[in-house]
Image: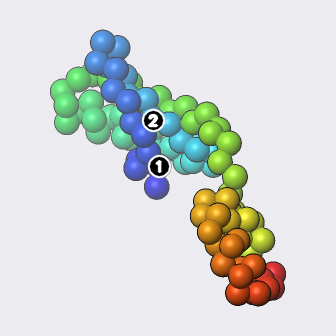
Amino acid sequence: MVLNRDIEWNQAESRINIQVENDVLLDRFQNLKMELCDFLRIQLNNYNLYIEAKLKENDDHKIIYSSQDKHNFMIQKFPIIAKFKSRLGLEINF
């Protein structure tokens, strides 16, 4: 779960930067960090290698939870849906 995130390699500093979305993933990564770092150091024969995890900056994506939110999102993305709804006299039950 943690290792399929955005990874950035800084060759000058021999540093791997991994960006995670939340504190839970950051904590999970911290538990794996030393074991992963040791493995990579041995496999790559690079004992100056460091791994660092950072929280990804929030990109203000609203998570759609309710049916009303889904409906509003779809109408925003495809305005034709609102026209179909009014022309066909449909009601949306939430």
Q: How many neighbours does mark 1 have within 10 angstroms: few (below 14), some (14-19), or many (20 or more)?
A: some
Query: Where's residue 50, x and y in %?
Result: 38, 24
Q: Residue furthest top?
A: 12
Query: Where's residue 13, x and y in %?
Result: 35, 14
As displayed, is residue 14 above or below residue 44? above
As displayed, is residue 71 above or below residue 77? below
Residue drawn at the location 47% of the way across and 49% of the way down: 2
Are the two marked residues, 1 and 2, in contact with CB atoms closer than 8 angstroms? yes
Q: Taking 16 as reference, is 47 left or right?
A: left
As displayed, is residue 93 above or below residue 10? below
Residue 84 occupies which quadrant of the picture?
bottom right
Residue drawn at the location 75% of the way across and 87% of the way down: 90
Q: Taking 20 as reference, is 7 left or right?
A: left
Whether residue 23 is visible, yes or no, is no
Residue 59 image label: none
Q: How is the image coloured?
A: rainbow
Query: Where's residue 75, x and y in %?
Result: 68, 65
Residue drawn at the location 45% of the way across and 35% of the way down: 18
Q: Which residue is mark 2?
A: 18
Residue 74 occupies which quadrant of the picture?
bottom right
- The residue type indicated by label 1 comes to Val
Whether residue 62 is visible, yes or no, is yes
- The residue type indicated by label 2 comes to Ile
Q: How many neighbours does mark 2 have within 10 angstroms: few (below 14), some (14-19), or many (20 or more)?
A: many
Q: Secondary structure at mark 1?
A: loop
Mark earlier in primary sequence (1, 2): 1
Q: Taking 56 as reference, is 46 left or right?
A: left
Q: Secondary structure at mark 2?
A: strand
Q: CA distance from mark 1 to mark 2?
A: 9 Å
Query: Where's residue 51, x and y in %?
Result: 41, 29
Q: Nearer the viewer, residue 59 or 28?
A: 59
Residue 2 image label: 1
